[in-house]
Image (cartoon, rainbow, N blue to C red):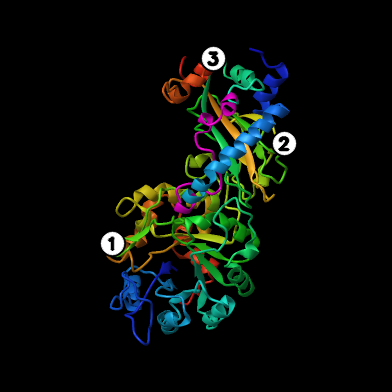
Amino acid sequence: MTRPAESHYGQFAKEGYLVLENALSCDELRRLQRAFDRCAAAARPAWVREVAAGTRPAAFFDIPDPLSREPLFLELVDHPSYIDLLLAFTNDELLFIGAQFRVVPSSPLSYVGWHYDVDRQNTPTHLKIQLYVEDVSADGGPFAFVPGSHKLDSGPYPPVRQLESMPGHRTFPGSAGSAILFDSFGLHTSMVNRTGRARKSIILIYEKWSAEKFAGQRYAHLAERLDTPLRRRLFGLEH
Amino acid sequence: MRIDAHVQVFARASAEFPRLLTDQMPAERAAPVEGLLGEMERHHIDGAILVQTGGAELEHHAYLRHCLKTHPNRFRGIALIPPTCDAPADHMDRLAAAGDILGFRLFDLGGPADPLAPIDVATFSTFPIWRRAAEKDYVLWLYPRARDAHLLPFLFDAFPQVRVVCNHLMVCPGEDKFSWDDKGRPRVEVEMPPQTRYSTMGLKIGRIPDNTRGIYPYENVCVHLSGQYAFSNESHPYRDLAEWHRNLLSTFGSARLLWASDFPWTSADPGYGSMVRVVDELLPGLRPRERSNIMGGTARSFLRFPLCA
């Protein structure tokens, strides 16, 4: 394992996030975009029906069971651009929780406001990778984070009527293939997307190992493809 | 001043008071205004918003207009617009001419059902209604279907001057999820909190409410605390909806929430008096000012309900 640079440790500890420009190579990105669009197009009609039935949100669309669909998708979970960082920030006790291959339609209202993801008092270190599948402009619903808000003694942070009113926040427009690694104890959101084009991104969710989240059979259906010791540990097949 | 912000009254069908006939509202069924007034007297409710039912054509509004004219200090009205109306602005103006009809109720918004389709509010079939509401300061009373939920923010954004009341806990019923129960009440099968909340409210409300730091961005939008019986899987006081009520309170604030009984559907079960108490049951920590807002203050200020009841 390659240990992260001291500057990475320092920034992550202080700010709660790291920006990883060009996390994917051009070739990886092209293949990912094609596969993403193919899977999203195949699942879209069922999603629209479920939206009308009120059983799925219209505000975002997740490709169902993405890791079963494309080998390329599975490879993102332990991608060399960030896996060492994730391992280092969890003392090598990293567990993969889930993936959201997400399409967010343009809307004047963000589907999420400023929020913390988890119960911060009772959850182990909880990390996410937000990977942009296409370029995300400043008005295209970029990820946003309040630096330092992952610390339990930070804040308080006020409820705000407009997302851009959150004190101290930073937004992360970025190019396709870039990623943001962040501590989901921190306040974050998806800013408003006014471009008229959907935002496509992949959210990978990890947590420091705990017996509570270690579920040996959860990814059993992928077992044949979890062909390295690291993957088997990440997916909870071994500990 | 306490105001019941959403009730329906209707007379037996007659030449004087024509209305559409349905299985649920046959010709002989009636929910007369006198019955509502009796309940209001008993439970110290000063005024109410009468919402048209029984048809959207001008003539179908005869009983509503009769009630508003007969009791000008107790009621204001919300009317309907026929979906196929060629001149909705004229229809709206004719009904609102007397000044006692505040606005109009919509169920369909008339935009694309696919959330990934291009959205242009000017192409919505209801655009002329929204435009007229903006021009004439009419209130829009919304009970949209789930297929339209994602269209709401576009309309709120385009028409910030239009006052909007989202009916019945901001739930947007899904296709084929609406029915009538064996007590003659509307029933909506919906998982609470509703999936449509991501489109209508944003804010990631519903999972860990204390983790959210947001207030609803559209100040021209209010929400009814009503219709609990139709969504709940429990009997009164519908405690399975308590968390959703707390979410609505934290998101909108009491100055944007309105209590309503949904008379007459609630008359037999749980009874009007129980509906008057339902807000206190589901939001027991309300401060006096918040309770006052929800039980009438918001209707008074937001709907400009007169103080003369």
Amino acid on which disc 3 is placed: Thr
Magenta stretch bounds: A51-75
Q: CA distance from mark 3 to mark 1?
A: 61 Å
Against B47, residue A232 (above or below) is above
Q: Residue at x 58, y 80 (%)?
A: B90
Q: Is residue B280 left or right of residue A57?
A: left
Quarter where residue B187 is shown: bottom left
Instruction: Check disc 2 and report the residue beneath it.
Output: A174
Q: Residue at x 34, y 52 (%)?
A: B238
Instruction: Check disc 3 and report the residue beneath it.
Output: A228
Amino acid on which disc 1 is placed: Asp
Percent from the top left, x then y, of residue A188? 61, 37
| Magenta-drawn stretch contains A124 | no
Quarter where residue B154 is shown: bottom right
The reply to whether dot 3 and dot 1 touch (C-beta < 8 Å) is no
Q: Residue at x 69, y 49 (%)?
A: A195
Report the chain holding disc 2: A
Q: Nearer the viewer, residue B38 or B82?
A: B82
**Disc ID at residue B269:** 1
Against B42, residue A233 (above or below) is above
The reply to whether dot 3 and dot 2 touch (C-beta < 8 Å) is no
